[in-house]
Image: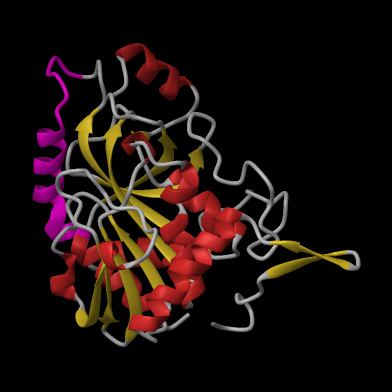
């Protein structure tokens, strides 16, 4: 275990206090990973719906099923496999989450963000978040890709509630620029150079698993929200707390409730995300390659 993250106690004046149960669990997971691989990623990528086969874009060095990591949460959602993929995109070392866990699956929010924290401990300084989202902005269409400029977190549980883990970050982290402006510029440039149409906007996370009601979507639009989903924001908060540089892209898989006459289904979300996958994968790949030069 590294000196930076291997402390088993915290200093409180002249006395040592035991580390929290959350931090202890995180460190057990970290030790388990390091027993299996010493790979150090530069960037961490969370693969949302539509990117399940993204491993084909990676020169894979090692795969680690979540089930082989002691205490690690395992996704129960169809379409979300459960493994870390270590390898290279061009010359950039990356770790990819093939399948994420969600708050609506019944996990505490500390478990939902545990993978994000773990990838930071592995060495990743960049977190690239992806998801499938419902379009709230009336100018959006299914299949559009949206660069996340900011988020609304008030409808999701904050992963920093409780005793602060001083080993990871400060008690009151600034949230002014969670989504790194330089990384946003990289993504915009990659989209332009590859002829990929890119929307931009504000993403909001709700808890799920039920889709939003038409009244809730009208409320979200009035708050300045452009897309809604059931992930991403809590991961961004945890990563920002640890000092990671963050960027994100949403695949608009459907128009949100009340915007069409059609009922919403998970199958529709998955099918639309799969249709957008070629452009989605291309944009992620070209962006990560450019980020390696930063």
Position of 192 relative to 143 (above/below): below
Q: Is residue 9 left or right of residue 242?
A: right
Which is more toward the observer, 67 or 249?
67
Q: Quadrant of residue 69?
A: bottom left
**Horizontal and vertical percent for residue 143?**
17, 43
**Horizontal and vertical percent for residue 231?**
37, 43
Which is more toward the observer, 92 or 235?
235
**Horizontal and vertical percent for residue 61?**
23, 85
Q: Quadrant of residue 40?
A: bottom left
Q: Is residue 36 left or right of residue 174?
A: left
**Horizontal and vertical percent for residue 281?**
20, 63
Quarter of the figure that contains the N terminus = bottom right
Residue 132: say if magenta: no
* Residue located farthest toward the top when viewing the structure as drawn: 215
Residue 262: say if magenta: yes
Which is more toward the observer, 20 or 104?
20
Q: Count the numbered circles shown.
A: 0
Residue 264 visible in this rendered orientation of the protein: yes
Q: Is residue 64 left or right of residue 57?
A: right
* Residue located farthest toward the right when viewing the structure as drawn: 14
Position of 164 relative to 70 (above/below): above
Q: How is the rendered protein coloured?
A: secondary structure
- Residue plotted at (26% across, 62% down): 67
Residue 195 visible in this rendered orientation of the protein: no
Per the picture, the main secondary structure of the magenta-coloured stretch is helix
Which region is colored magenta?
260-280
- Residue plotted at (33% across, 48% down): 101
- Residue plotted at (19% across, 56% down): 81
- Residue plotted at (58% across, 54% down): 21
């Amino acid at each position: 275990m590294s000196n930076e993250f291997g402390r088993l106690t915290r200093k409180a004046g002249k006395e040592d206090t035991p580390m929290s149960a959350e931090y202890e669990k995180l460190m057990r997971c970290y030790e388990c990973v390091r027993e299996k691989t010493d790979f150090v990623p530069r960037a961490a990528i969370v693969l949302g719906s539509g990117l399940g086969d993204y491993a084909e874009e990676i020169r894979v060095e090692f795969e680690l099923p979540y089930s082989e990591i002691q205490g690690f949460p395992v996704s129960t959602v169809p379409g979300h496999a459960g493994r870390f993929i270590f390898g290279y995109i061009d010359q950039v070392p990356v770790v990819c989450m093939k399948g994420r866990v969600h708050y609506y699956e019944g996990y505490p929010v500390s478990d939902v963000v545990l993978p994000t924290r773990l990838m930071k401990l592995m060495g990743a300084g960049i977190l690239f978040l992806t998801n499938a989202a419902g379009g709230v902005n009336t100018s959006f269409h299914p299949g559009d890709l949206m660069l996340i400029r900011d988020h609304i977190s008030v409808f999701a549980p904050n992963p920093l509630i409780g005793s602060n883990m001083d080993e990871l970050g400060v008690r009151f982290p600034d949230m002014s620029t969670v989504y790194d402006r330089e990384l946003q510029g990289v993504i915009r440039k990659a989209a332009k150079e590859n002829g990929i149409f890119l929307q931009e906007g504000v993403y909001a996370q709700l808890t799920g698993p039920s889709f939003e009601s038409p009244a809730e979507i009208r409320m979200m639009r009035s708050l300045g929200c452009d897309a809604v989903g059931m992930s991403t924001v809590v991961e961004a908060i945890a990563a920002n707390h640890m000092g990671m540089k963050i960027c994100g892209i949403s695949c608009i898989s459907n128009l949100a409730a009340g915007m069409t006459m059609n009922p919403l289904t998970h199958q529709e979300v998955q099918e639309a995300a799969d249709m957008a996958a070629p452009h989605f994968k291309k944009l992620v790949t070209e962006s990560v390659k450019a980020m390696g030069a930063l």
